[in-house]
Amino acid sequence: MTTEEFKAELWRMANSLRGSVSAAQYKYPVLGLTFLKYVSDMFEAQGDFIRDELKNPESELFIEDEELRLDAGAAFTEDKTFYDKDNVFWVPEEARFSVLLSKASSSNIAQLLDDAMASIEKDNPRLKGVLYRDFGRLELGPGKLGELMTTVARIKFDPQTHGSKDIFGEVYEYFLGKFAMSEGQRAGEFYTPKSVVTLIVEILAPFKGKIYDPACGSGGMFVQSNRFKEAHAKKAGDVGDLAIYGQEYMAATRKLCLMNLAVHGLEGDIGKTYGSTFTEDQHSKLRADYILANPPFNISDWEGNALKDDPRWIYGVPPAGNANYAWLQHMLSRLSQKGRAGIVLANGSLTTQSSGEGAIRKAMILGDQVECILALPPKLFSNVTIPACIWFLSKDKTEGGNGSINRNGEVLFLDCSNLETENISKTQVVFQDETIEKISQTYHRWRGTEFADSKEYVDELGFCKSATHSDIAEKNYEITPGRFVGAEGKLFDSSVYEEQMGALCGELRELLDESAELQTEMLQQLKVIGYEL
């Protein structure tokens, strides 16, 4: 069975056991048990390694006398320092998966699992408050939890035969993706599709410096950035260095992120607690080299009315009824002098003129903060049906990696809405690796970075166009890529549709705001004359 087949089979078995428990609830115990199996396997493998080192004449731990070696093995394998030095989590005996599995049929197995997670957190400060500890509250039928443990027990992580962190990371991310597909609309709270994350990472190319995600979900942007760094390090002969910073609004989702980082052997500053990036910003002094984010689209309850005088709004106060331009300006304010950002937003952000958003967009463009706009194809997101795009912002467009390209006064438009994708379900598609390579290389050639191949950038009808600010002004600073790249063989102009829908949505938002104001006024007048609803 291949790794992909094994993951699919494991998912099928695990999902078949959840009964009436929703996917939103069920993902936490499944991911928690998978993590428990991973740390237990790694702990046991470390014990085997210690015993092997005691037998190895070339090891500094070598003990020739067999009786002394056995005594030392018993002592060393229960000494936490021998695990800490190799970044292996310490797992108390009562919390080891094999011990708990032997009690899987017990009536109190849920409590034993909760206690096990608590003891692991106690002995590993990095995991404090991270692990799932609500097995006792799960509404699973009798024996279902034991069956789930038996399913998870099929996974075997062996650092001597394969990269267990990578394998476990794959299983963890696979499960996140499958739960996202199961949850639909709610999945946006914790998951960005891997191909979208990979595309942003391949374009921003984070290698050295600080990376930041102010709506970090389960941490996929961080994991993929680290993969890029490691892959490039092998080619460049330079290990690279990335410092991770993030914040997450949802408490449970923040735990998923911290666990995901732990799974991949990463550490980061995800703030002291969960909370709103707008009202409880935990990285106000941060200046990041790379920002990668997929914030929630079009949110209206971001407490904008309380932040009208916030210094982050350099290009204009964002409307209280939509946070899109608050996200854009927040991220601009957190960039270093040469920092760049990739932000996923709804397509409406490209054309809206309502509530001052059009004026903010114009000011950002003329301020040379907008570097690239990328239109995405439909169905990339399992949880979002409206068209989406990626804004790439830059604090410095004056020179590329080779020092020869100046992109001041220009914006690169990429219309990827008709590029080849692969179906992974009836409702979702992904970018193929070749497509991601085509898109990212187009950007790197245009920008002149060290990651570009030997080809020169050229505009391509229907796909890419380097437009000047004058070109953008002619289109009233409405920046749907389809309006700039041209259409090759298209009977339906999606850019016109998006422009019209953006305008209609803007008008509807204004009418709804006006309606709310009139309703408030009417209730106040009724109260004046003695009638209160």
Image (cartoon, grey):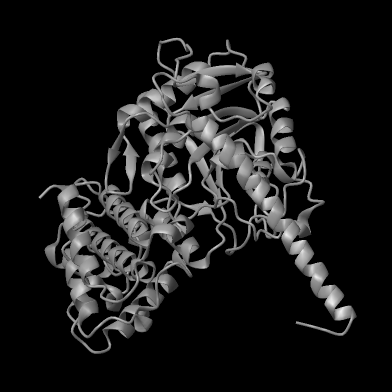
In the displayed structure image, the side of residue 222 where residue 89 appears, left or right:
left
Residue 131 seen by the camera:
yes
Instruction: Where is residue 99? Give x, y as percent.
Output: 21, 77
Instruction: Where is residue 161? Give x, y as percent.
Output: 17, 48
Q: Nearer the viewer, residue 286 or 382?
A: 382
In the displayed structure image, the side of residue 444 where residue 210 appears, left or right:
right
Up-down relation of residue 124 to residue 215 (above or below): below
Up-down relation of residue 485 to residue 66 (above or below): above
Q: How many marks?
A: 0
Q: Nearer the viewer, residue 179 or 204?
A: 179
Q: Nearer the viewer, residue 389 or 18?
A: 389
- Residue farthest toward the left in the current orientation of the protein: 1
- Residue farthest toward the right in the current orientation of the protein: 528
- State the residue at coordinates (32%, 30%): 420
Up-down relation of residue 298 to residue 371 (above or below): below
Instruction: Where is residue 200? Give x, y as percent.
Output: 46, 36
Up-down relation of residue 192 to residue 456 (above or below): below
Q: Quadrant of the C terminus?
A: bottom right
- State the residue at coordinates (28%, 37%): 422
- State the residue at coordinates (55%, 50%): 297
In the displayed structure image, the side of residue 382 where residue 277 appears, left or right:
right
Q: Quadrant of residue 466?
A: top right
Residue 400 seen by the camera:
no
- Residue farthest toward the bottom in the current orientation of the protein: 107
Q: Quadrant of residue 480?
A: top right
Q: Quadrant of residue 399?
A: top right
Q: Nearer the viewer, residue 517 or 183?
A: 517
- State the residue at coordinates (31%, 78%): 113
